[in-house]
Amino acid sequence: MNSAHELVTLIDALRTLHSAGHSHAALATLTRTRGSTFRRPGTRMLVFGDDHVVCELSGGCPQRDIVLRAQEVIASGEPRLVNYNAESGLDVLMEMGCGGELEVLIEPIGLPHASDFVDALARCLEHRHRAHLATLFAVNDKVVMPRRLLWCDAVIRHDDLGDAALSEAVMAAANLNDSGRATTLRIPSPAGTADVLIELIAPTHALVVIGSSAAARALLPLADALGWRTVLVDQDSQRLQAADLPTAALKVCASPVTIRQLLPLDAHSSVVVMTHNLEQDIAYLAALRGAPVAYLGALGSRERVGRMRHEPALEGLRLHAPAGLDIGSETPEEIALAVTAEIMAVINGRDGGPLRDNQGAIH
């Protein structure tokens, strides 16, 4: 599926198309994959009539063929479902050595109400709510113009399925699929068996860095490049005005006493404490106890972290310290890479190990 950063880019592009009111574009969505593929179900690419694309899928042979077929969809105004496998004769992934198979939905964009769901989705993400998006694209194995259901916190925000019973069935199916990954399910409906892509969409990840150090100046731009929201916190307002600080980051002057009031945190946030003052680090970490963040880390040597762990105020605190994966980092830029990699591993539920197994094979 698309990253939160890619999704924001797509939403902006679709909103522009919606306001322009023209139909010279198509939306390509991976609905099913099997084996080794370049992206997973739920990943989207917007294709314009001049072959310009937003959010490239792969850049290789599959993408070129998808763009070509998107042009045919733009011309006809009819959705298509394209299978890339040996049976269809479109086994481009096998030719590239991936060996995978995939199914791609290509739908025309610009028709009346084709992207009405986008504004509702944008509002959910702007308020930092997780959203479920369901796309119905086939009935009884026949492709239909996609219809969508969107809900946040069990409240329906958009529904053009046209069948209340089907909407309930889709929401119930989504509740049973708790893997967090996008998947296409076959759901019975009055009109027949419906193919529905169901996705769990999370808001943009936010990284909060406490302490305006050299490591912070290296970490924030890297997080920004990943599309994360970035926030720099320091209790000294003068340090927050330094000319060499990353310009994209929101700057918040907050002490350990005021940080929870001044900085709302949620399950899609990570915090790294790096003031380089042990007492300040401990005070900030103690203030963040119970914060609903995905990751809480602290920078420092093993000796320094050992002193933190013996601090009564931090007893029982779930803390990643020293923050970062062990990749031999020394410079601020290398440390930033190690910390960012560990945060990604945690929020994606991975252990941060190599892709190969003990026999040297790629996963």
Image: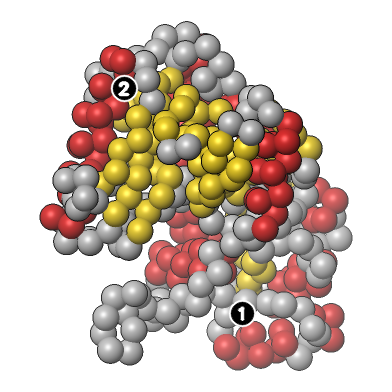
Q: Position of residue 58 (x, y in %)?
A: 27, 46
Q: Position of residue 10 (x, y in %)?
A: 46, 32
Residue at x-position 57% and y-position 88%: 302
Callout 2 crowding tier (Cα within 10 Å): few <14, some 14–19, many ≥20: many
State the quadrant of the C terminus: bottom left
Is residue 233 found left or right of 263 in the rendered image? Answer: left
Residue at x-position 35% and y-position 40%: 104
Q: Residue furthest top?
A: 21
Is residue 73 found left or right of 32 in the rendered image? Answer: left
**Up-down: is 42 above or below 271?**
above
Say whether residue 229 is visible.
no
The label shown at residue 330 is: none
Distance between the alpha carbons at the discs numbered 1 and 2: 52 Å
Is residue 343 found left or right of 284 in the rendered image? Answer: left
SS at circle 2 = helix
Q: Earlier in the sequence, mark 1 or mark 2?
A: 2
Q: Amino acid at mark 1?
A: Ala
Say whether residue 62 is visible.
yes
**Up-down: is 286 above or below 44?**
below
Q: Amino acid at mark 2?
A: Val
- 214 and 285: which one is in front? 285
- 308 and 236: which one is in front? 308
Q: Residue furthest left?
A: 95
Q: Position of residue 177 (x, y in %)?
A: 62, 58
Tell which tag, 1 or 2, sits nearer the viewer: 2
Is residue 180 found left or right of 144 in the rendered image? Answer: right
Q: Which residue is mark 2?
A: 73
**Up-down: is 17 above or below 281?**
above
The part of the image, by quadrant, that contains residue 149 is: top right
Q: Which residue is mark 1?
A: 321
Q: Position of residue 33 (x, y in %)?
A: 37, 54
- 42 and 268: which one is in front? 42
